Amino acid sequence: MRKVVTSAPSFPEAQLDALLTLECGVRWQVACGDAGHWRVGFYSPAETSAAAIQELETHNCPEFFLLLTGRLVLVLRDEMGTREVELKPGKPILVQAAHSGYCPGGAHSGVAIVVERDAFETTYELYAG
Ligand SMILES: [Fe+2]
């Protein structure tokens, strides 16, 4: 198990009042935020099944996901056990459980917008899907 501390400001400078350019085909990119408050990122994992996931992450605060394109399944583990939740357009989820995700339609083929705090802690644990 390893722990990573994310400290504010944890996002790149973003030009205000202008369209932002995002990369395609990357697992995680942080687009912008408000120092000391929140940041927004885009999550698009390379894994295409739960069996390919090697670790789950847990934050000390909830994390918001909303599907933008494609298909994306979250793998969640808490005291109730492990379950998979496929994201649906227009149906956001606020995640507190240990989590990771995969794109059943192919690597990086699904994208979710993520909103989280600007500063938080993450614990990673091994996962054998
Ligand atoms: Fe997370």
Image: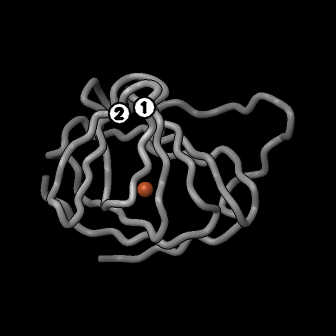
Amino acid bearing label 2: Leu
Tag 2 near tag 1, CB within 8 Å: yes
| Quadrant position of residue 126 | bottom left
Pointer 2 residue Cβ closer than 8 Å to ligand 1: no
| Quadrant position of residue 45 | top left
Element on which disc 2 rests: loop
Q: Is residue 1 left or right of residue 11?
A: left
State how many labels appear. Answer: 2
Q: What residue is shown with label 1?
A: 91
Image quadrant where one finds the N terminus: bottom left
Q: Which mark is residue 119?
A: none
Provide residue 99's location: percent of width, then percent of height: 32, 55
Element on which disc 1 rests: loop
Amino acid bearing label 1: Lys
Provide residue 15's location: percent of width, then percent of height: 84, 40
Q: What residue is shown with label 2?
A: 87
Residue neighbourhood size for the residue with mark 2, other residues' Cα within 10 Å, grouped as few (<14), some (14–19), many (≥20)? many
Provide residue 85's location: percent of width, then percent of height: 26, 40
